[in-house]
Image: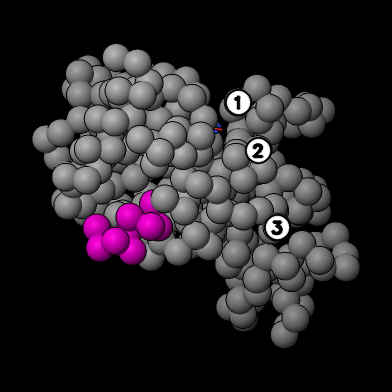
Amino acid sequence: MDKESLLLSLKQDIAKARHIAFFGGAGVSTESGIPDFRSANGLYQEGYGDISPETILSHDYFYRHTGEFYDFYREKMLYLDAKPNPAHLYLAKLERERKRVSIITQNIDGLHQKAGSKEVYELHGSVHRNKCLSCGHMVDANYIKNYKGRIPLCPKCSGLLKPEVVLYGEPLPEDALYGAIEALMEADLLLVAGTSLSVYPAAGLLHYYKGEGKIYVLNLSPLPFDKTLKKRVVTIEGKLAESILELQRL
Ligand code: CNA
């Protein structure tokens, strides 16, 4: 089938669906100007000497090299002027039209909420919440970005602030995890977009999807699904936001 026919079939399945689960990753926000990790222009292609981004964005590194962590984090992970793109906006519009749309995201940028989506499970947390490890006071991402000093400290007690972002070596937040599992078990249509499905345990959650229909994948490149899911997968290659605009025109 050509791309137009695939998008038409997706549009019809969306119209029929009662409850859509959308499982997304960094590729959902590249068209908002936020680089992903693994694409040709992704963060992993840049060099940081001998240290990999996974190492810098890890629990141990945060505590042992807090200054270096924040140098990287503030320069590479905070895109506070980014705006939702047509994919974020379309999903929010579906929800406003009284469909249940559960957004399960590995992103930490808050763009689904900015677009208006209400049911969002942030598996890897959010740059917008930052907690003082001493007194529990919360600050926003602007405070972290604009702090005059290498390591942002709490405005109330000068304690160390930590972004509520899931670092490598940390467990997923239980609320988001169980909410995502429940949504996947209840949904009757699954869309997977802008993710390499290489970060676990997030990628493994797709097995909780119990709907009987197809699984649509909207990604720049095909994804490695195992045998159980593979036969139901329909892949629509290309840029997500462009595909969504095309779908809306059909
Ligand atoms: P990834 O491993 O970088 O994979 C991104 C995937 O998206 C790749 O398969 C790309 O081919 C695909 N892709 C890129 N641009 C587009 C596009 N415009 N349309 C369709 N597909 C596209 O990212 P994952 O999310 O799979 O990896 C999980 C990490 C990335 C999570 O821990 C995130 O927290 C982390 N991350 C998040 C952000 C963000 O919040 N915006 C940015 C960078 C990294």
Disc 3/disc 1 C-alpha distance (Å): 22 Å
Instruction: Please report contact status of discs 3 and 2: CB closer than 8 Å, yes or no.
Output: no
The quarter in which the N terminus is drawn is top left
- Residue placed under numbered mark 1 in the picture: 39
Which residue is pictured at 77% across the width and 62% down the height? 145
Q: Amino acid at mark 2?
A: Pro
Q: Point out the residue furthest to the top here.
A: 1
Q: Residues within 10 Å of mark 1 (few under 14, many from 20)?
A: some
The residue depicted at 54 percent of the width and 58 percent of the height is 110
SS at mark 1 in the image = loop
Numbered mark located on residue 81 in the image: 3
Amino acid at the residue labelled 1: Ser
The disc, 3 or 2, on the residue closer to the chain's N-terminal end is: 2
Q: Is residue 16 left or right of residue 202?
A: left
Q: Position of residue 140 (x, y in %)?
A: 65, 71
The quarter of the image that holds ligand 1 is top right
Above or below, 25 against 115 in this view is above
Q: Is mark 2 within 8 Å of ligand 1?
A: yes
Q: Amino acid at mark 3?
A: Asp
Q: Describe the element under mark 3 as helix, strand or loop.
A: loop
